[in-house]
Image (cartoon, helix red, strand yellow):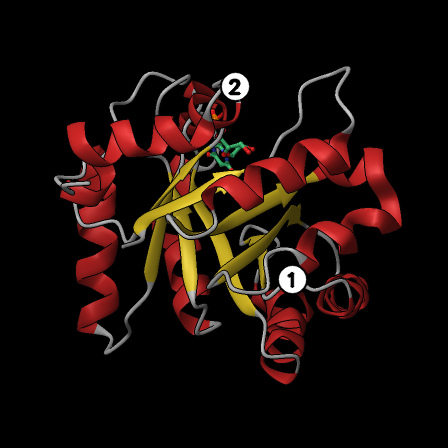
Amino acid sequence: MRIPIVIALDPPLGVDVVKWSLDIVSETSDLVVGYKIGLPLVLRVGDRVVEITRAMKESELVVADLKLADIGDIMALVADQLAEMGFNAIISHAFIGWSKGLETLANKAFEKSLKLITVLSMSHPGSSEVIDKNYEKLLEITLRARAWGCVIGANKEELIRKTKGKARENGLDLKVLSPGIGFQGIPPATAIRAGADYEIIGRLITCSSKPRDKLFELMRNYYGVKS
Ligand code: BMP
């Protein structure tokens, strides 16, 4: 039984990053749907990230979270590289716009069978300053790109509901991935109850001395899974 959690692998300072990641993956991969890897990890291990993505072969989601925001041709180069490195999903900002921006990346993602995930609303308070004010436009670009999924903070339950509804009206099953659980203050399963498909959880699990036990605890106490 896998719970709809994507573990964010953001390694703390001072650890052997490859070993730290492989230990977490071997302990948890049969319990979660996947993992998310971003700059804090990639900058420290470089090419060795493939040793980590290789260990995730059985996982449904191996997400590269570089929050791309460049001209389309350059993002397409990055996407090629990420596919090569074993990722099957990539996160991009949507505020770059469609024409020769997300348009080019969406085509590349399709060509490489990468799941394209855009950022619609973030979990930190500053999201309200610019990003949230442009939600309607960001959603429009996301739907136009036929993105596989989008990121919406777990603290934005209303936006999660609205997004799922609007995607459905357009005949699309846009997946919602929600971070902000645990260390950022939102209780586990909050976003799932609002209609999100996955919750992205990092430190609540990765800072635990026993990530597997932590997951069993979350399953029992929040996700209604008997173990
Ligand atoms: P944590 O559960 O440790 O707070 O980690 C959350 C993860 O989700 C981090 O990797 C962060 O980059 C990411 N994230 C976020 O917290 N809020 C967003 O709006 C978008 C994110 O990608």
Percent coordinates x, y for residue 104 in the rendering: 67, 74
Q: CA distance from mark 2 to mark 1?
A: 24 Å
Q: Is residue 212 above or below residue 199?
A: above
For the point 36% across and 35% down, the residue is: 153
Inspect this view and state whether residue 49 appears: yes
SS assignment at label 2:
loop
Residue count near mark 1 (Cα–Cα under 10 Å), binned few <14, some 14–19, many ≥20: many
Percent coordinates x, y for residue 201 in the rendering: 42, 34
Residue count near mark 2 (Cα–Cα under 10 Å), binned few <14, some 14–19, many ≥20: few
Quickly name the residue at label 1.
87
Q: Is residue 93 left or right of residue 2?
A: right
At label 2, the amino acid type is Cys
Inspect this view and state whether residue 155 appears: no
Q: Is residue 131 above or below residue 32?
A: above
Q: Is residue 15 above or below residue 117?
A: above
Q: Of the residues under marks 2 and 1, which one precedes in the sequence?
A: 1
Residue, far right: 47
Label 2 beta carbon less than 8 Å to ligand 1: yes
At label 1, the amino acid type is Phe
For the point 42% across and 22% down, the residue is: 204
For the point 18% across and 32% down, the residue is: 220
For the point 25% across and 49% down, the residue is: 196
Quickly name the residue at label 2.
207
Residue 183's image quarter?
Answer: top left
Percent coordinates x, y for residue 24 in the rendering: 56, 36
Q: Find residue 44 and name its label.
A: none
SS assignment at label 1:
loop
Look at the numbered discs 2 and 1 and tell me whether their residues touch, using CB distance below 8 Å.
Answer: no
Percent coordinates x, y for residue 226 in the rendering: 14, 41
Query: Which circle, 2 or 1, is nearer the viewer?
Result: 2
Exactly how many numbered labels are in the figure? 2
Of 36 and 77, nearer the camera is 36
